[in-house]
Protein backbone atom coordinates (compact mmCIF):
# COMPACT_ATOMS: atom_id res chain seq x y z
CA UNK A 1 0.00 0.00 0.00
CA UNK A 2 1.27 3.45 -0.83
CA UNK A 3 1.54 5.28 2.45
CA UNK A 4 0.63 8.44 0.59
CA UNK A 5 -2.70 7.16 -0.62
CA UNK A 6 -5.21 6.81 2.14
CA UNK A 7 -8.31 5.02 0.87
CA UNK A 8 -11.69 5.51 2.42
CA UNK A 9 -14.11 2.62 2.20
CA UNK A 10 -17.57 2.09 3.62
CA UNK A 11 -17.42 0.61 7.07
CA UNK A 12 -20.71 0.88 8.91
CA UNK A 13 -19.62 -1.68 11.54
CA UNK A 14 -17.04 0.69 12.94
CA UNK A 15 -19.47 3.59 13.00
CA UNK A 16 -22.06 1.70 14.99
CA UNK A 17 -19.56 0.30 17.44
CA UNK A 18 -18.15 3.73 18.27
CA UNK A 19 -21.64 4.98 19.05
CA UNK A 20 -22.57 2.02 21.23
CA UNK A 21 -19.55 2.59 23.45
CA UNK A 22 -20.54 6.20 24.11
CA UNK A 23 -23.27 5.14 26.48
CA UNK A 24 -20.87 3.13 28.60
CA UNK A 25 -18.75 6.19 29.24
CA UNK A 26 -20.53 7.52 32.31
CA UNK A 27 -19.59 4.37 34.23
CA UNK A 28 -15.99 5.51 33.97
CA UNK A 29 -16.46 8.76 35.86
CA UNK A 30 -15.42 7.67 39.32
CA UNK A 31 -11.94 6.33 39.92
CA UNK A 32 -10.00 8.00 37.14
CA UNK A 33 -11.35 11.47 37.70
CA UNK A 34 -9.98 11.47 41.24
CA UNK A 35 -6.73 13.27 41.85
CA UNK A 36 -6.09 14.55 38.35
CA UNK A 37 -6.81 18.08 37.31
CA UNK A 38 -6.15 17.15 33.73
CA UNK A 39 -8.69 14.36 33.81
CA UNK A 40 -11.23 16.59 35.48
CA UNK A 41 -10.71 19.13 32.72
CA UNK A 42 -11.15 16.43 30.09
CA UNK A 43 -14.26 15.21 31.87
CA UNK A 44 -15.84 18.64 31.83
CA UNK A 45 -15.19 19.00 28.13
CA UNK A 46 -16.23 15.66 26.74
CA UNK A 47 -18.55 14.12 29.23
CA UNK A 48 -16.81 10.80 28.68
CA UNK A 49 -15.64 10.94 32.25
CA UNK A 50 -19.13 11.70 33.46
CA UNK A 51 -19.75 15.26 32.26
CA UNK A 52 -22.83 16.51 30.50
CA UNK A 53 -22.15 15.82 26.88
CA UNK A 54 -21.00 12.65 25.12
CA UNK A 55 -19.64 14.60 22.17
CA UNK A 56 -15.91 14.54 21.55
CA UNK A 57 -14.33 17.63 19.98
CA UNK A 58 -11.52 17.14 17.49
CA UNK A 59 -8.78 19.64 16.63
CA UNK A 60 -6.22 19.16 13.88
CA UNK A 61 -2.73 20.61 13.55
CA UNK A 62 -1.42 20.35 9.98
CA UNK A 63 -4.28 20.41 7.50
CA UNK A 64 -2.45 19.13 4.40
CA UNK A 65 -3.09 15.81 2.65
CA UNK A 66 -2.96 13.50 5.65
CA UNK A 67 -4.48 16.06 8.01
CA UNK A 68 -7.59 16.17 5.85
CA UNK A 69 -7.50 12.38 5.49
CA UNK A 70 -7.16 11.81 9.23
CA UNK A 71 -10.03 14.23 9.98
CA UNK A 72 -12.19 12.37 7.49
CA UNK A 73 -11.21 9.03 8.99
CA UNK A 74 -11.89 10.22 12.51
CA UNK A 75 -15.27 11.78 11.77
CA UNK A 76 -16.28 8.75 9.74
CA UNK A 77 -15.12 6.28 12.37
CA UNK A 78 -17.47 7.13 15.21
CA UNK A 79 -20.69 8.80 16.23
CA UNK A 80 -20.59 11.78 18.56
CA UNK A 81 -17.39 13.33 17.24
CA UNK A 82 -17.10 16.75 15.64
CA UNK A 83 -14.24 18.76 14.20
CA UNK A 84 -14.06 22.08 16.04
CA UNK A 85 -10.61 23.62 15.46
CA UNK A 86 -7.89 23.63 12.81
CA UNK A 87 -4.34 24.96 12.71
CA UNK A 88 -1.71 25.26 9.99
CA UNK A 89 1.11 27.59 9.04
CA UNK A 90 -1.36 29.82 7.25
CA UNK A 91 -5.05 30.10 7.92
CA UNK A 92 -5.84 29.84 4.20
CA UNK A 93 -4.64 26.21 4.30
CA UNK A 94 -7.19 25.50 7.06
CA UNK A 95 -9.93 27.21 5.06
CA UNK A 96 -9.21 25.03 2.05
CA UNK A 97 -9.15 21.91 4.17
CA UNK A 98 -12.42 22.80 5.89
CA UNK A 99 -14.07 23.24 2.49
CA UNK A 100 -12.67 19.95 1.32
CA UNK A 101 -14.15 18.17 4.37
CA UNK A 102 -17.48 19.97 3.98
CA UNK A 103 -17.62 18.66 0.41
CA UNK A 104 -17.75 15.11 1.73
CA UNK A 105 -21.40 14.24 2.35
CA UNK A 106 -20.46 11.40 4.70
CA UNK A 107 -18.97 13.68 7.31
CA UNK A 108 -20.01 17.26 6.47
CA UNK A 109 -22.46 17.65 9.40
CA UNK A 110 -19.63 16.85 11.80
CA UNK A 111 -17.42 19.63 10.43
CA UNK A 112 -18.25 22.45 12.84
CA UNK A 113 -15.23 24.71 12.66
CA UNK A 114 -16.06 28.40 12.94
CA UNK A 115 -13.92 31.01 11.22
CA UNK A 116 -12.42 32.07 14.52
CA UNK A 117 -11.44 28.49 15.38
CA UNK A 118 -9.00 28.29 12.46
CA UNK A 119 -5.48 29.43 13.27
CA UNK A 120 -2.41 30.20 11.20
CA UNK A 121 1.24 30.45 12.21
CA UNK A 122 3.96 28.59 14.03
CA UNK A 123 2.03 29.01 17.28
CA UNK A 124 -1.26 27.75 15.81
CA UNK A 125 -0.76 24.45 17.62
CA UNK A 126 -1.12 26.14 21.02
CA UNK A 127 -4.42 27.64 19.96
CA UNK A 128 -5.82 24.35 18.68
CA UNK A 129 -4.66 22.45 21.74
CA UNK A 130 -6.09 25.04 24.13
CA UNK A 131 -9.37 25.45 22.28
CA UNK A 132 -12.01 24.82 24.97
CA UNK A 133 -13.98 22.35 22.85
CA UNK A 134 -11.00 20.26 21.73
CA UNK A 135 -10.62 16.87 23.43
CA UNK A 136 -8.59 15.02 20.80
CA UNK A 137 -5.75 16.59 18.84
CA UNK A 138 -4.77 15.15 15.46
CA UNK A 139 -1.07 15.78 14.73
CA UNK A 140 -0.39 15.73 11.00
CA UNK A 141 2.28 18.32 10.31
CA UNK A 142 5.65 17.39 8.88
CA UNK A 143 7.17 14.89 11.34
CA UNK A 144 9.88 17.13 12.82
CA UNK A 145 7.22 18.95 14.86
CA UNK A 146 5.61 15.82 16.28
CA UNK A 147 7.47 15.65 19.64
CA UNK A 148 6.86 19.33 20.47
CA UNK A 149 3.20 19.19 19.49
CA UNK A 150 2.65 15.89 21.27
CA UNK A 151 4.24 17.17 24.48
CA UNK A 152 2.06 20.30 24.41
CA UNK A 153 -1.12 18.31 23.77
CA UNK A 154 -0.41 15.74 26.47
CA UNK A 155 0.55 18.44 29.01
CA UNK A 156 -2.78 20.13 28.29
CA UNK A 157 -4.57 16.85 29.07
CA UNK A 158 -5.73 16.23 25.50
CA UNK A 159 -5.97 12.89 23.73
CA UNK A 160 -3.74 12.55 20.67
CA UNK A 161 -3.72 10.93 17.27
CA UNK A 162 -0.15 11.26 15.95
CA UNK A 163 0.88 10.38 12.44
CA UNK A 164 4.10 8.43 11.96
CA UNK A 165 6.99 8.89 12.37
CA UNK A 166 6.69 10.26 15.89
CA UNK A 167 10.26 11.61 15.92
CA UNK A 168 13.13 12.25 13.52
CA UNK A 169 15.97 12.51 16.04
CA UNK A 170 17.08 11.19 19.45
CA UNK A 171 15.86 14.27 21.36
CA UNK A 172 12.42 13.76 19.83
CA UNK A 173 12.54 10.06 20.72
CA UNK A 174 13.12 10.82 24.39
CA UNK A 175 10.48 13.55 24.33
CA UNK A 176 7.72 11.29 22.97
CA UNK A 177 8.60 8.62 25.55
CA UNK A 178 8.12 11.28 28.26
CA UNK A 179 4.77 12.18 26.67
CA UNK A 180 3.80 8.50 26.75
CA UNK A 181 4.58 8.35 30.47
CA UNK A 182 2.55 11.46 31.19
CA UNK A 183 -0.37 10.28 29.07
CA UNK A 184 -0.44 6.99 30.96
CA UNK A 185 -0.38 8.81 34.27
CA UNK A 186 -3.17 11.13 33.21
CA UNK A 187 -5.18 8.41 31.44
CA UNK A 188 -5.20 10.16 28.11
CA UNK A 189 -4.78 8.35 24.80
CA UNK A 190 -2.06 8.48 22.15
CA UNK A 191 -2.78 6.46 19.02
CA UNK A 192 -0.25 6.52 16.18
CA UNK A 193 -0.65 6.29 12.41
CA UNK A 194 1.05 2.92 11.97
CA UNK A 195 -1.89 1.47 10.07
CA UNK A 196 -0.28 -1.91 9.30
CA UNK A 197 -0.90 -2.76 12.95
CA UNK A 198 -4.64 -2.62 12.21
CA UNK A 199 -4.51 -4.46 8.89
CA UNK A 200 -5.57 -8.16 8.93
CA UNK A 201 -2.80 -9.40 6.59
CA UNK A 202 -0.24 -8.11 9.09
CA UNK A 203 -2.13 -8.81 12.30
CA UNK A 204 -2.99 -12.42 11.47
CA UNK A 205 0.41 -13.33 10.05
CA UNK A 206 2.36 -11.70 12.87
CA UNK A 207 0.12 -13.32 15.47
CA UNK A 208 1.00 -16.70 13.92
CA UNK A 209 4.70 -15.82 13.91
CA UNK A 210 4.44 -14.96 17.59
CA UNK A 211 2.62 -18.26 18.16
CA UNK A 212 5.66 -20.05 16.71
CA UNK A 213 4.39 -21.24 13.32
CA UNK A 214 7.78 -20.56 11.66
CA UNK A 215 9.78 -21.42 14.79
CA UNK A 216 12.42 -18.92 15.90
CA UNK A 217 13.10 -16.13 13.43
CA UNK A 218 16.71 -16.34 12.25
CA UNK A 219 16.75 -13.69 9.50
CA UNK A 220 14.59 -11.68 7.16
CA UNK A 221 14.32 -9.04 4.47
CA UNK A 222 12.28 -5.88 4.44
CA UNK A 223 11.97 -3.37 1.60
CA UNK A 224 10.23 -0.06 1.15
CA UNK A 225 11.23 0.65 -2.42
CA UNK A 226 9.05 3.15 -4.22
CA UNK A 227 9.38 5.62 -7.06
CA UNK A 228 10.01 9.32 -6.68
CA UNK A 229 8.35 11.61 -4.16
CA UNK A 230 6.91 15.10 -4.56
CA UNK A 231 9.10 18.21 -4.63
CA UNK A 232 7.52 21.63 -4.06
CA UNK A 233 9.33 24.38 -5.90
CA UNK A 234 10.10 27.53 -3.95
CA UNK A 235 7.43 30.20 -4.43
CA UNK A 236 8.35 33.81 -5.02
CA UNK A 237 8.99 35.81 -1.87
CA UNK A 238 9.49 32.81 0.42
CA UNK A 239 12.19 33.06 3.09
CA UNK A 240 14.49 30.06 3.48
CA UNK A 241 12.48 28.93 6.49
CA UNK A 242 9.13 29.25 4.74
CA UNK A 243 10.49 27.34 1.78
CA UNK A 244 11.82 24.49 3.91
CA UNK A 245 8.55 24.20 5.79
CA UNK A 246 6.68 24.11 2.48
CA UNK A 247 9.01 21.62 0.77
CA UNK A 248 9.57 19.73 4.01
CA UNK A 249 10.16 16.26 2.57
CA UNK A 250 13.63 17.27 1.41
CA UNK A 251 14.93 18.68 4.70
CA UNK A 252 16.18 16.30 7.34
CA UNK A 253 15.09 18.29 10.42
CA UNK A 254 11.49 18.17 9.18
CA UNK A 255 11.32 14.80 7.41
CA UNK A 256 14.02 12.59 8.89
CA UNK A 257 14.87 11.23 5.39
CA UNK A 258 12.82 8.63 3.50
CA UNK A 259 13.86 5.89 5.90
CA UNK A 260 12.04 7.80 8.66
CA UNK A 261 9.11 9.32 6.85
CA UNK A 262 8.08 6.38 4.69
CA UNK A 263 10.06 3.23 5.41
CA UNK A 264 9.24 3.49 9.11
CA UNK A 265 6.12 1.48 8.25
CA UNK A 266 8.25 -1.55 7.42
CA UNK A 267 10.71 -1.06 10.24
CA UNK A 268 7.70 -0.96 12.54
CA UNK A 269 6.46 -4.26 11.09
CA UNK A 270 9.89 -5.84 11.57
CA UNK A 271 10.14 -4.70 15.20
CA UNK A 272 6.59 -5.93 15.77
CA UNK A 273 7.30 -9.38 14.24
CA UNK A 274 10.31 -9.57 16.53
CA UNK A 275 8.01 -8.98 19.53
CA UNK A 276 8.61 -5.24 19.62
CA UNK A 277 12.25 -5.54 20.41
CA UNK A 278 14.27 -2.84 18.70
CA UNK A 279 17.47 -3.82 16.87
CA UNK A 280 20.81 -3.88 18.66
CA UNK A 281 22.78 -2.24 15.87
CA UNK A 282 22.85 -1.28 12.19
CA UNK A 283 25.47 -1.23 9.45
CA UNK A 284 24.98 -0.27 5.83
CA UNK A 285 25.16 2.43 3.24
CA UNK A 286 23.15 4.92 1.24
CA UNK A 287 23.36 7.98 -0.93
CA UNK A 288 21.61 10.32 -3.29
CA UNK A 289 21.69 10.13 -7.08
CA UNK A 290 18.42 11.45 -8.43
CA UNK A 291 17.00 14.11 -6.09
CA UNK A 292 16.66 17.80 -7.02
CA UNK A 293 19.79 19.83 -6.29
CA UNK A 294 18.85 21.23 -2.87
CA UNK A 295 17.32 18.03 -1.47
CA UNK A 296 19.15 16.94 1.70
CA UNK A 297 17.78 13.42 1.80
CA UNK A 298 19.09 10.17 0.37
CA UNK A 299 17.23 8.33 -2.38
CA UNK A 300 18.51 4.87 -1.39
CA UNK A 301 19.63 3.18 1.81
CA UNK A 302 20.61 -0.47 2.33
CA UNK A 303 20.97 -1.54 5.90
CA UNK A 304 21.64 -4.68 7.91
CA UNK A 305 19.85 -4.50 11.22
CA UNK A 306 20.97 -6.95 13.86
CA UNK A 307 18.31 -7.87 16.41
CA UNK A 308 18.78 -9.64 19.77
CA UNK A 309 19.92 -13.24 19.33
CA UNK A 310 21.89 -12.37 16.18
CA UNK A 311 18.80 -12.16 13.95
CA UNK A 312 19.77 -10.23 10.82
CA UNK A 313 17.23 -8.23 8.85
CA UNK A 314 18.40 -7.03 5.47
CA UNK A 315 16.56 -3.79 4.81
CA UNK A 316 16.34 -1.47 1.79
CA UNK A 317 14.48 1.71 1.03
CA UNK A 318 14.57 3.65 -2.19
CA UNK A 319 12.74 6.47 -3.97
CA UNK A 320 14.05 6.51 -7.52
CA UNK A 321 11.79 7.49 -10.41
CA UNK A 322 11.42 4.67 -12.93
CA UNK A 323 12.47 1.92 -10.52
CA UNK A 324 10.22 -0.93 -9.37
CA UNK A 325 7.94 -0.61 -6.37
CA UNK A 326 8.55 -3.32 -3.81
CA UNK A 327 7.14 -3.10 -0.30
CA UNK A 328 7.65 -6.47 1.43
CA UNK A 329 8.67 -8.19 4.64
CA UNK A 330 9.91 -11.78 4.71
CA UNK A 331 10.85 -13.60 7.89
CA UNK A 332 12.81 -16.84 7.84
CA UNK A 333 12.41 -19.08 10.87
CA UNK A 334 13.68 -22.47 12.00
CA UNK A 335 10.45 -24.11 10.78
CA UNK A 336 9.29 -21.96 7.87
CA UNK A 337 9.09 -18.66 6.03
CA UNK A 338 6.51 -15.88 6.41
CA UNK A 339 5.82 -13.30 3.70
CA UNK A 340 4.00 -10.46 5.43
CA UNK A 341 2.69 -7.83 3.09
CA UNK A 342 0.06 -5.14 2.70
CA UNK A 343 -3.10 -6.92 1.52
CA UNK A 344 -1.83 -10.50 1.53
CA UNK A 345 0.44 -12.72 3.57
CA UNK A 346 1.66 -16.26 3.07
CA UNK A 347 3.36 -18.64 5.47
CA UNK A 348 5.12 -21.81 4.24
CA UNK A 349 7.15 -24.53 5.89
CA UNK A 350 10.61 -25.32 4.55
CA UNK A 351 9.15 -27.97 2.22
CA UNK A 352 7.07 -25.29 0.54
CA UNK A 353 3.82 -26.49 2.10
CA UNK A 354 1.34 -23.71 2.77
CA UNK A 355 0.65 -23.18 6.49
CA UNK A 356 -1.39 -19.98 6.27
CA UNK A 357 -2.61 -17.57 3.64
CA UNK A 358 -4.64 -14.38 3.87
CA UNK A 359 -5.69 -12.27 0.90
CA UNK A 360 -8.17 -9.82 2.35
CA UNK A 361 -7.57 -6.19 3.17
CA UNK A 362 -10.36 -6.06 5.75
CA UNK A 363 -11.66 -2.85 7.24
CA UNK A 364 -9.91 0.36 6.30
CA UNK A 365 -7.09 0.50 8.87
CA UNK A 366 -6.89 4.29 8.66
CA UNK A 367 -10.47 4.49 9.92
CA UNK A 368 -9.96 1.71 12.46
CA UNK A 369 -7.16 3.69 14.10
CA UNK A 370 -9.63 6.43 14.91
CA UNK A 371 -12.46 4.09 15.90
CA UNK A 372 -10.05 2.43 18.36
CA UNK A 373 -8.91 5.81 19.68
CA UNK A 374 -12.43 7.09 20.27
CA UNK A 375 -13.61 3.75 21.71
CA UNK A 376 -10.65 3.65 24.08
CA UNK A 377 -11.46 7.14 25.37
CA UNK A 378 -15.09 6.27 25.85
CA UNK A 379 -14.56 2.93 27.52
CA UNK A 380 -12.08 4.39 29.98
CA UNK A 381 -9.04 2.50 28.76
CA UNK A 382 -7.22 5.06 26.65
CA UNK A 383 -4.71 3.46 24.29
CA UNK A 384 -1.13 4.71 24.61
CA UNK A 385 0.79 2.98 21.83
CA UNK A 386 3.49 5.53 21.21
CA UNK A 387 6.41 3.53 22.68
CA UNK A 388 6.42 0.98 19.83
CA UNK A 389 6.18 3.75 17.24
CA UNK A 390 8.95 5.68 19.02
CA UNK A 391 11.14 2.58 18.82
CA UNK A 392 10.45 2.10 15.12
CA UNK A 393 11.02 5.80 14.45
CA UNK A 394 14.36 5.57 16.26
CA UNK A 395 15.15 2.36 14.35
CA UNK A 396 14.82 4.54 11.23
CA UNK A 397 17.01 7.29 12.73
CA UNK A 398 19.57 4.59 13.59
CA UNK A 399 19.58 3.46 9.95
CA UNK A 400 20.05 7.05 8.83
CA UNK A 401 22.96 7.48 11.26
CA UNK A 402 24.60 4.30 9.94
CA UNK A 403 24.05 5.26 6.27
CA UNK A 404 25.26 8.84 6.71
CA UNK A 405 28.31 7.90 8.79
CA UNK A 406 29.23 4.60 7.13
CA UNK A 407 29.80 3.26 10.63
CA UNK A 408 28.20 0.50 12.66
CA UNK A 409 25.87 2.27 15.09
CA UNK A 410 24.07 0.80 18.09
CA UNK A 411 20.49 1.46 19.11
CA UNK A 412 21.77 2.50 22.53
CA UNK A 413 23.95 5.14 20.93
CA UNK A 414 21.01 6.50 18.94
CA UNK A 415 18.74 6.49 22.00
CA UNK A 416 21.25 8.52 23.99
CA UNK A 417 22.64 10.73 21.20
CA UNK A 418 22.51 14.47 21.88
CA UNK A 419 21.39 15.31 18.33
CA UNK A 420 18.38 17.64 18.33
CA UNK A 421 17.39 18.90 14.88
CA UNK A 422 14.46 21.17 15.80
CA UNK A 423 15.56 24.73 16.67
CA UNK A 424 14.37 25.83 20.12
CA UNK A 425 11.42 28.24 20.11
CA UNK A 426 11.07 28.36 16.35
CA UNK A 427 9.67 31.66 15.01
CA UNK A 428 9.48 33.12 11.50
CA UNK A 429 12.71 34.99 12.33
CA UNK A 430 14.68 31.81 13.18
CA UNK A 431 17.34 31.17 10.52
CA UNK A 432 16.48 28.05 8.51
CA UNK A 433 18.63 25.10 9.59
CA UNK A 434 21.26 24.37 6.94
CA UNK A 435 22.22 20.72 7.16
CA UNK A 436 22.98 20.10 3.53
CA UNK A 437 23.45 16.75 1.85
CA UNK A 438 25.67 14.41 3.84
CA UNK A 439 28.51 12.71 1.98
CA UNK A 440 28.58 9.10 3.22
CA UNK A 441 31.39 8.65 5.70
CA UNK A 442 31.75 12.37 6.40
CA UNK A 443 29.16 12.70 9.11
CA UNK A 444 29.89 13.36 12.75
CA UNK A 445 27.82 11.22 15.04
CA UNK A 446 27.08 13.15 18.22
N1 LIG B 1 0.14 6.77 7.69
C1 LIG B 1 0.24 7.08 6.42
O1 LIG B 1 0.03 6.23 5.55
C2 LIG B 1 0.60 8.47 6.00
C3 LIG B 1 0.33 8.90 4.70
C4 LIG B 1 0.68 10.21 4.34
C5 LIG B 1 1.32 11.02 5.27
N2 LIG B 1 1.57 10.57 6.52
C6 LIG B 1 2.24 11.45 7.51
O2 LIG B 1 1.41 12.57 7.77
C7 LIG B 1 2.23 13.72 8.03
C8 LIG B 1 1.81 14.85 7.09
O3 LIG B 1 2.01 14.46 5.74
P1 LIG B 1 1.20 15.14 4.56
O4 LIG B 1 1.38 14.25 3.40
O5 LIG B 1 -0.16 15.47 5.02
O6 LIG B 1 2.02 16.49 4.33
P2 LIG B 1 1.45 17.87 3.78
O7 LIG B 1 2.62 18.70 3.40
O8 LIG B 1 0.39 17.62 2.77
O9 LIG B 1 0.74 18.51 5.06
C9 LIG B 1 1.45 18.96 6.17
C10 LIG B 1 0.76 20.24 6.65
O10 LIG B 1 1.31 20.62 7.90
C11 LIG B 1 1.47 22.03 7.88
N3 LIG B 1 2.48 22.38 8.88
C12 LIG B 1 3.82 22.19 8.81
N4 LIG B 1 4.41 22.61 9.94
C13 LIG B 1 3.43 23.07 10.74
C14 LIG B 1 3.42 23.63 12.06
N5 LIG B 1 4.55 23.80 12.76
N6 LIG B 1 2.23 24.00 12.58
C15 LIG B 1 1.08 23.84 11.87
N7 LIG B 1 1.03 23.32 10.62
C16 LIG B 1 2.20 22.93 10.08
C17 LIG B 1 1.86 22.35 6.46
O11 LIG B 1 1.66 23.70 6.12
C18 LIG B 1 0.98 21.40 5.68
O12 LIG B 1 -0.27 21.97 5.35
C19 LIG B 1 3.66 13.25 7.86
O13 LIG B 1 4.20 12.90 9.10
C20 LIG B 1 3.56 12.00 7.01
O14 LIG B 1 4.60 11.09 7.26
C21 LIG B 1 1.21 9.32 6.91
Image: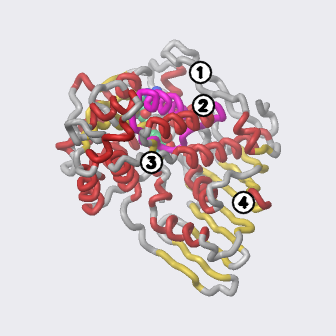
**Residue designated by label 3:** 383
Model colouring = secondary structure
Place residue 66 in its image quadrant: top left
Front label number (3 vs 2) = 3
Ligand 1 within 8 A of label 4's CB? no
Residue 253 — which label?
Answer: 2
- Whichever of labels 1 and 4 marks the residue nearer the N terminus, that label is 4
Q: Is residue 394 visible?
A: yes
Q: Is residue 78 above or below residue 342?
A: above
- Report the residue at 56% width, 47% height from top: 389
Q: Earlier in the sequence, mark 3 or mark 1?
A: 3
- Residue range in magenta is 144-171
Position above or below: 434 against 11: above
Give the position of the C terminus as an image quadrant: top right
Q: Position of residue 195 (x, y in %)?
A: 46, 54
Q: For numbered disc 3, what is the local secondary structure?
A: loop
- The residue sitting at 46% across, 74% down in the picture is 359
Q: Which residue is mark 4?
A: 314
Amino acid sequence: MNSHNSQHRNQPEITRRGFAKATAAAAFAGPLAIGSTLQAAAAARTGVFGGNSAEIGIGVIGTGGRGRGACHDNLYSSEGVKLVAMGDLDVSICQKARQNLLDSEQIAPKVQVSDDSMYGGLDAYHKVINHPQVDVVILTTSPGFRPVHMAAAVKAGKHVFAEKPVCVDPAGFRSVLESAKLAKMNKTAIVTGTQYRRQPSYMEAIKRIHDGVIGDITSGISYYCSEGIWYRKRLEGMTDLQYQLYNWYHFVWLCGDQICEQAVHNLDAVNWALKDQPPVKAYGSGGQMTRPADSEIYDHISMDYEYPGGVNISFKCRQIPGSDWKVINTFVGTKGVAHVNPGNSLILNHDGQELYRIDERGLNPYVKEHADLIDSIRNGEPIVEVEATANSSLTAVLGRFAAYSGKEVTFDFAANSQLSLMPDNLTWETPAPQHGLVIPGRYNLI
